[in-house]
Image (cartoon, helix red, strand yellow):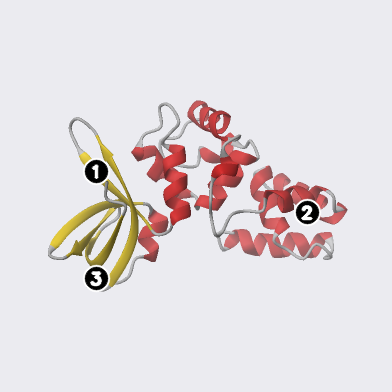
Amino acid sequence: MIASLRGKLIYKDNTSAIIECSGVGFKCFVTKNTLYKLPQINEDVFLNTYMVVREDAMDLYGFWDVEELETFKLITSVSGVGSKIGLALLSEFTASQLTLYIASNDPKALTAASGVGIKLAQRIVLELKDKIGSLESGDTIDIKAVGNVTVNTNSKEAVAALVALGYSQSEASLVVSKQDQSLSVEELIKLSLKSLARGL
């Protein structure tokens, strides 16, 4: 099992990267989130990796951080969810966002990822919502903090307003929870919309 690669980035495209280690080039399939963080060609890079061995192929997947790797492994443990769907989900969402959507029972949000229909999304949420706590991360979402926005009246109203504008309950709760909870409803909505425009 190849657990990680450290070497020189010699190639990258929309779905993969090739890391040269001691003269050997290893091709890794990567998420868009990892792709955006890769350095320029011929610069040094480190990726956490996960190898998938099948009868007809032996593929290596590369991830910028351990959180993304562990989330990929968790997602692909669901029946009917292969590596392609795992990459699609982690290309559409960060590991933290994906964790939140599952923990807050929001399968509809997952359908934004390519190839993920509502039935598959519901299965993912059903099988994983009780396992989310097992994820170890240096950048985990504070689910308790997100839940606490309902305690603050202004935050609750701000979340409701964002939902009315078309955002999902979990997405709205997440972005509002990151704001100063002492702000007025109008200020919370304004700052939250700015954050959403920047991609949370």
Q: Earlier in the sequence, mark 1 or mark 2?
A: 1
| Residue occupied by mark 1 | 59
In the foreground, 9 or 161 = 9
Question: In the figure, residue 166 lies in which quadrant?
Answer: top right
Residue at image point 45% right, 31% down: 78
Tag 3: amino acid:
Ile
x%, y% of residue 137? 53, 55
Residue at image point 45% right, 47% down: 70
Horizontally, is 69 left or right of 127 in the view? left
Distance (Cα) linking label 3 and label 1? 22 Å
Q: Earlier in the sequence, mark 3 or mark 1?
A: 3
Horizontally, is 122 left or right of 48 in the view? right
Instruction: Bin the neighbour count of mark 1 within 10 Å (Cα to Cα): few under 14, some 14-19, many 20 and up.
Output: some
Tag 1: amino acid:
Asp
Measured along the vertical axis of the image, is residue 6 above or below residue 152?
below
Distance (Cα) linking label 1 and label 2? 45 Å
Instruction: Bin the neighbour count of mark 3 within 10 Å (Cα to Cα): few under 14, some 14-19, many 20 and up.
Output: some
| Residue occupied by mark 3 | 41
x%, y% of residue 104? 65, 40
Tag 2: amino acid:
Ala
Q: Nearer the viewer, mark 1 or mark 2?
A: 1
